[in-house]
Amino acid sequence: MEVITSPIGLTDSAVKEIMQIIADKQIPAEYGLRVGVKGGGCSGLSYVLGFDLQKEQDNVYEVNGIRILMEKSHGMYLAGMEIDFVEGLNNRGFSFNNPNAVKTCGCGSSFEA
């Protein structure tokens, strides 16, 4: 079986939070974590992050034991991105460190590539 290197990475805190969500929400084993982009947001593109079934146009990767689903066409926007989970006084949630983003908005959930 050919192993394809994932174009994205997950920090240890992101992996821990994703595993906790899978356990708490009882996400079925056939689902993977969909990572992608969609049009919209104040900078042109927004991130997609959620659990989904594999679709025909997806590439499938495994990162730290988590099955990642990504539409083949989204790789150019997300290559080299790292997903983190932050838990601070003013902010709690997933953050995206994307080297392809030439401009991001203040909320951190949309970008321009």
Image (cartoon, rainbow, N blue to C red):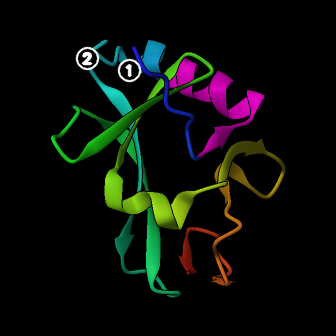
Q: Residue at x 45, y 86 (%)?
A: 44
Magenta stretch contains residue 16: yes
Q: Earlier in the sequence, mark 1 or mark 2?
A: 1
Task: Say what amino acid the circle numbered 1 marks.
Answer: Lys
- Residue at image coords 67%, 34%: 14
Which x, y percent locates residue 63?
A: 58, 27
- Which corner quadrant holds the N terminus? top left
48, above or below 70, in the image: below
Which residue is under mark 2?
Answer: 30
In this view, the residue farthest toward the right is 89
Name the quadrant containing residue 90.
bottom right
Left or right for 92, reference 32: right
Amino acid at circle 2: Glu
Q: Position of residue 32 (x, y in %)?
A: 36, 28
Task: Say few, some or many: other residues with alpha carbon within 10 Å of mark 1 (under 14 / 14 to 19 / 20 or more).
Answer: few
Q: Is 85 within the magenta? A: no
Say which element carries label 2.
loop
* Residue 81 image-quadrant placement: bottom right
In the drawing, what numbered circle is on residue 25? 1
> For the magenta stretch, what is the residue range?
8-21
Q: CA distance from mark 1 to mark 2?
A: 14 Å
Q: Quadrant of the C terminus?
A: bottom right
